[in-house]
Amino acid sequence: MRLLALETSCDETSAAVLSGTSAAPALESLVILSQDVHTVFGGVVPEIASREHLTAVVPVVERALADAKVSLADIDAIAVTHAPGLVGALLVGVSYAKALATAAGKPVIGVHHMEGHLFATVLEHADATPPFTALLVSGGHTLLLDVEAWGSYRLLGRTRDDAAGEAFDKAAKLLGLPYPGGRHLEQLARSGDPKRHRFTKPMLNAGQKPGDVDYYDVSFSGLKTAVLLATQQAVDLEAEKPHIARGFQDALIGTLVAKTIRAAKAHGRTKIVLGGGVACNGALVDAMRAEGKKIGAEVFAPTPRLATDNAAMIGAAALFRLERGERSEATLNAHSAMPI
Ligand code: KG4
Ligand code: ZN
């Protein structure tokens, strides 16, 4: 089985060619075009994202096919992210995938974007297979899942307000860093004193046992306010910025790690899989590894290219769906929201 995968849910236009099986996927090519145009607006502008996808989708797909040294005739199926995401952005990918599939007489399969993030790690680590606890942390989502088997996902916790990446980006903005600010904030925090701003780890002690509302949920809006107050109260703001960044990052990571370890322990999981753009954060991965070790859990994190949005992860998830005999109808549509 060889497939062409497409991802256009937010501000990356990406295409990939994969072959093999979901147990041993082989990535033959991956092209990711990031839309830098949004930087000046300090956030993704949905209408602009759609237009950029329209311009980019054909050359990106052609490049992915050329890099894999194949043509459309060598492709057995076309996979595309159809939910969740910006509906106009998703529509470009879905429409193009359906058109290609119809013209070439190939099946098309719609993939859930977050299921794609779950499959990203297995592209590089053959052992990153279920059962495992998963923490998916991106610009739009923060999900804590128990993954019993591929296709069997139990949502344990989520954010009550801002996603982890969104919180990073907003805190970074308050510190005068460019958008998207997550990696800039991580960089700045490296020279910060961890003792100077001990922000409360949000919702760490909320809920006493599994089943309690809040036990696995997180919330980052209060932490964002703490950052704002710290910037307003700083005597020398420039000198204070690395310390505020460090305090913010430690608090956010502290909560994410504690809740993930709590979930792994409660479900007896010995593997923890990270995904989403925030999984690029070295401090998060290091802290998760250190705490995971204490409960005998191995932590798997994708490399940055596969942690952030990309079509390879959509292709890996699609291999699994196609092997199960799933195919999408010609009525496949884009949806801004959809449970995993
Ligand atoms: O998964 P992703 O590429 O796109 C979404 O689906 O949202 O995630 C992007 C998010 C942004 O909020 C970005 O600031 C954050 O991931 N991010 C980071 C780091 N690298 C990217 N956050 C913290 N530390 C990083 N090193
Ligand atoms: Zn994503």
Image: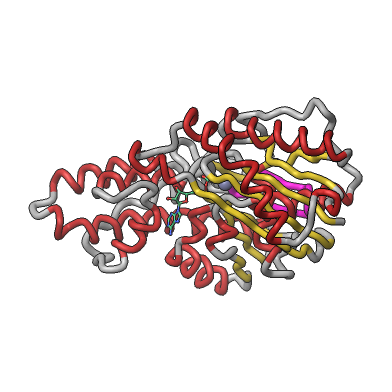
Q: Quadrant of the N terminus?
A: bottom right
**Camera-side residue of 194 and 111:** 111
Q: x%, y% of residue 168?
A: 38, 49
Q: Residue at x 77, y 33 (%)?
A: 99
**Membership of 150 in magenta stretch:** yes
User: Taking 48 as reference, is 76 above or below it?
Assistant: below
**Camera-side residue of 61 and 139:** 61
- The answer to whether residue 36 is left or right of residue 307 is left
Q: Which residue is drawn at 21% across and 43% down?
A: 229
Q: In this view of the protein, can residue 47 be seen by the observer?
A: yes
Q: x%, y% of residue 62?
A: 68, 49
**Membership of 280 in magenta stretch:** no
**Camera-side residue of 157 and 236:** 236
- The answer to whether residue 333 is left or right of residue 232 is right
- The answer to whether residue 170 is left or right of residue 205 is left
| Magenta region | 143-155
Q: Which residue is drawn at 44% across and 39% down?
A: 162
Q: In which quarter of the image is residue 316?
A: bottom right
Q: x%, y% of residue 220?
A: 40, 43
Q: In this view of the protein, can residue 118 be seen by the observer?
A: no
Secondary structure, magenta segment, majority class: strand
